[in-house]
Image (spheres, grey):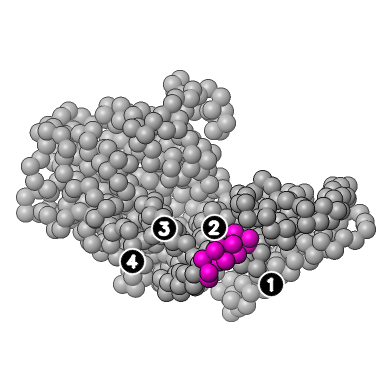
Amino acid sequence: MTQKDSMASNPMFDAFQQALGQSWQKALASLGELGQGGAWGGGQLSPLPQFSFQADRLQQLQREYTEQAMALWQQGFAATPSGDKRFAGEAWSRNPVAAFSAAVYLLNARTLLQMAEAVEADEKTKARLRFAVEQWMAASAPSNYLAFNAEAQQKAIESKGESIARGVQNLVHDMRQGHVSMTDESAFEVGRNVATSEGAVVFENELFQLIEYKPLTAKVYERPLLLVPPCINKFYILDLQPENSLIRHAVAQGHRTFVVSWRNPDESLAQTTWDDYIEKAAIEAIRVVREISGQDKKGGQINTLGFCVGGTILSTALAVLAARGEQPAASVTLLTTLLRFEDTGVLDIFIDENFVRFREMQMGQGGLMPGADLASTFSFLRPNDLVWNYVVGNYLKGETPPPFDLLYWNSDATNLPGPMYCWYLRNTYLEDKLADPQGVTVCGRKIDLREIEAPVYIYGSREDHIVPIGGAYASTQVLTGKKRFVMGASGHIAGVINPPAKKKRSHWLREDGKFPATHAQWLQGATEVPGSWWTDWDAWLQSHAGKQIAAPKAYGKGTAYKLIEPAPGRYVKAKA
C-alpha cells in the first residue's frame, strides 16, 4: 500500500493502513497454506491487492478528523451521540460516560468509512475494504458490550440482575441450537401455523417432493402452474400465512398449483451435482406436472415460476429441454433471479478464483455446504439489523425476540451438496458463463438460454441487496421470448411477498415493449403504479393459462400419482 505524497503521521490513519495490510496478508497466507500440494495450482495465489490514497484527500480527512475530535474533547462528558438508533434511548443521554463513548465511536466510524471510500483501487478491492470496515465497525460498537451499553446497565439495575441471568440463559440456548435467535422459534411449527395451504405430496424422489394444492375455485385453468423456489431456503416463504401466501393467491386465482419442496440434504446427498438438480428435480417436476394435468399429450404446456436460485435452476432446465427439442413451458415467471452474473451486489466481494478453488478443494468432490454457514453469510450482509441487534437484545438485555414468521423462516437453514454448490459458484458468480450461448454443458448438452421460446415475466426488487435490480433486469437482454419486466419497491423478500390486500408499496411498468441495455435506461420510460405487482402478474399469467375446466376432485392422477402425505410434507420439516 502506498501514498502518493508523504505527510504528517496520524496514529489512527497509520493503524487503518497497517490493519488492512495485515488482514490481506493473513487471509491470503492462510489460503496459501490450505492450497499447498498443487490443489491451488501449485500454491500460486493472486497477488496482494494494491491501493493508495490521494495525498490531498487524505490530508483533508485528517484535518476534519482532528477538528471534530478536538471539538468532542472540549464537550467532554456533555457530548451526545445523534443520528444512530443504537444510541437513541434515553438511558444513553443520561449516562455521560456511555454517551461520550458512543460519540467517539461514531466519529471514528464516519472517518474510517470515508477513508475506505477515498481509497484508489479497482472496484472489487474498494468493495472489500468497505465491507471489512463496515463489519469491523458494526462489531466494535459500544452498544454491543455491557460495560458501555447504558440501556442494558439500566435494565440490569431495574430488574435486580434478572436481565443478566436471562441473557446468560439465552446465550446458552443459542449456543446449543447453533445460531442467534431472531424470533421466538417455539411459537411456530411448519404445517401448523406456517405453510398451512391445503394440499398433498403427490410425487417424491431423493431430491424433492412435489406438492399439489387443493383448488379454491370450481373451475381451474387447463395449464397448471409449477413453482420452483430457491433450494438455499425452504419453500414456505411462498406460504407463510394465508394473508400473504403467494401459493394461496395463485390457487385462489384458479390456477392448479404445484410446488417443489426441496429435500434438506444430508450425507446421503453429498455427491449430488448441479446436473442432478436439473435432471432429477426441475426437469422431473416439469414431467410429472405435465402428466398429472394431462399436458403431456399433443405438446401440451404448463406455466412455470422460479424464485431466486429457483429461477436459475428452472431456466437451466428449460434450456436443457430446448436443446433436446422440447418446449414444455407456456410461460416463465422469474422473481429476483440472476441469469447474467455481472451485477451481483455485495455477494461479489466473496467471489474470486482463490475462494472458489478453496471450496472446490473442500467439497467439490463430495460433502455438504452447511446451512448455518449460508445463513450466517446472509445475516452479516446486514450485521446491525440481523446480528448485533439480537446479540444486544438477547444477551445484554435478556429479552426474548417477538414471534415473526419471516424471521422464523430465515432461521430454518438448508444445506447444499458440495459438488452442486461448487459448480454453481464457478460457472455463475465467478465465470458468468451460464448466459453465454453454448457456454456450459448441463446434463450432457451445451445449452443456450436464448432457445427458451416461452414468454417471460421478469420481476426485480428496487432495494434488493442479494439480486440487485440491475442483475434482475439483465435477464431481459438474455431471453428472446416475449418479455415483460416489472420493478417492485423494497427488498429481496418484502418486495416479492406483497399481497394486494395490504395496499403497500408500488411497482413500475413500461408499456412500450422496449428493453434498452440497462435498467436505468428502462426506468426512464417506466411509470410508477401504487400497490402490489401481483395484480399485474395475475392478468399476464391468465393470458397464458388456457381455457377453464372443472377443478379436479382428487390429488394426483390415478394410481401413478396419488396422495403420499398431506402438505407441507416431511422434507420441509427436516432441520439442517
Mark 3 element type: loop
Query: Looking at the rendered structure, which numbered label has been put on residue 26?
Result: 1
Q: Alpha-carbon distance for marks 1 and 3?
A: 36 Å
Does the magenta-highlighted stretch encompass residue 153? yes
For label 3, the residue is 183
Q: Residues within 10 Å of mark 2 (few under 14, many from 20)?
A: some
**Amino acid under disc 2:** Asn
For label 4, the residue is 575
For label 2, the residue is 389
**Amino acid under disc 1:** Lys
Asked whether, in this view, residue 28 is left or right of residue 39, the answer is right
Locate the N terminus and report the quarter of the image it occupies. Answer: bottom right
Mark 1 element type: helix
Q: Nearer the viewer, residue 534 or 35?
A: 534
Q: Earlier in the sequence, mark 3 or mark 4?
A: 3
Q: Residues within 10 Å of mark 4 (few under 14, many from 20)?
A: few
In the image, the segment drawn in magenta is 149-161
Residue at 41%, 29% (x, y): give it: 531
Q: Marks 1 and 3: CB-CB under 8 Å?
A: no
Q: Looking at the image, can residue 441 be seen?
A: no
Residue at 27%, 27% (x, y): give it: 543
